[in-house]
C-alpha cells in the first residue's frame, strides 16, 4: 500500500510537468514551441529516504494554438513507474487544468500563473498539495516541485526537446 501511495504522490509531481514547457509571456503563442517529444532525467527525494534518479519522456500536443495543450508523460526510476495525462489552459497569465495518473487511477487540479517566463503553480489531489516552479529556455526545461510534509518532498527534472 505504501508503494501505491508513493507512486500516486509522484504522479502529482509528474502532473506538474504539464506546465514545464510554458515559455515567457510574449506576442507569439505561449504553448506552440512545446509541440513534440521531450526527454530528461532528474532526482526525486522521498521525505524518509535517499534521492533517487528518475527518467522521463513527455509528448506535448497543442489542442488550441497558443493557449491549450495535452500531454502524455511516462516516468520511471528503479522503484517507480507512472503514466500520466494532463490538459492545461492559459488565459492571460492564469493557468488551469487537470491531470490523471492511469496506473493508479488518481487525478486532480493544476492552477497558477505564468509571468515573464516564471511559472508558479499549485498541484492538488485528494491526498497531496505541491508548489511548482518551472522555467523554459529554448529547447531546455527545468522543473522543481516541493511538497513539504508529503511522502515525496521534492522532485527536480531537466528536460530537452527532441531534435526534429
Image (cartoon, helix red, strand yellow):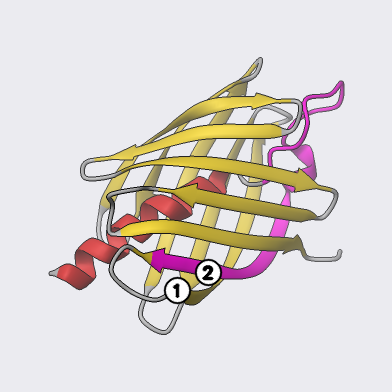
Per the image, the residue denoted by label 1 is: 51
**Residue in the image at 60% along x and 66% along y:** 57
**Residue in the image at 78% along x and 56% along y:** 140
Q: Quadrant of the N terminus?
A: bottom left
In the rendered structure, the answer to whether residue 147 lies left or right of residue 136 reads left
In the rendered structure, the answer to whether residue 77 lies left or right of residue 24 reads left
- Residue 44 position in % (x across, y down): 46, 66
**Looking at the rendering, which quadrant does residue 91 occupy?**
top right
Q: Specify whether residue 26 is painted magenta.
A: yes
Residues under numbered marks 2 and 1 in contact, where contact means CB atoms less than 8 Å apart? yes
Whichever of callouts 2 and 1 sits on the residue coming sooner in the sequence is 2
Q: Give the magenta range.
A: 21-45
- Residue 141 position in % (x across, y down): 71, 53
Q: Is residue 24 visible?
A: yes
**Looking at the rendering, which quadrant does residue 103 occupy?**
bottom left
Q: Nearer the viewer, residue 130 or 8?
A: 130
**Vertical arrangement, residue 1 with respect to residue 23, above or below:** below
**Vertical arrangement, residue 91 with respect to residue 79, above or below:** above
Amino acid at each position: 500500500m505504501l508503494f501505491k501511495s508513493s507512486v500516486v504522490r509522484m504522479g502529482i509531481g509528474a502532473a506538474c510537468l504539464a506546465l514545464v514547457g510554458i515559455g515567457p509571456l510574449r506576442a507569439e503563442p505561449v504553448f506552440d514551441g512545446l509541440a513534440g517529444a521531450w526527454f530528461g532525467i532528474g532526482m526525486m527525494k522521498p521525505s524518509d529516504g535517499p534521492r533517487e534518479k528518475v527518467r522521463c519522456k513527455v509528448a506535448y500536443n497543442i489542442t488550441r494554438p497558443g493557449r491549450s495543450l495535452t500531454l502524455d508523460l511516462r516516468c520511471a526510476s528503479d522503484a517507480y513507474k507512472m503514466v500520466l495525462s494532463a490538459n492545461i489552459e492559459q488565459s492571460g497569465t492564469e493557468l488551469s487544468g487537470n491531470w490523471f495518473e492511469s496506473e493508479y487511477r488518481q487525478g486532480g487540479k493544476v492552477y497558477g500563473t505564468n509571468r515573464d517566463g516564471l511559472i508558479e503553480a499549485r498541484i492538488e489531489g485528494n491526498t497531496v498539495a505541491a508548489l511548482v516552479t518551472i522555467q523554459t529556455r529554448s529547447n531546455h526545461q527545468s522543473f522543481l516541485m516541493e511538497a513539504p510534509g508529503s511522502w515525496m518532498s521534492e522532485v527536480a527534472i531537466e528536460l530537452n526537446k527532441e531534435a526534429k
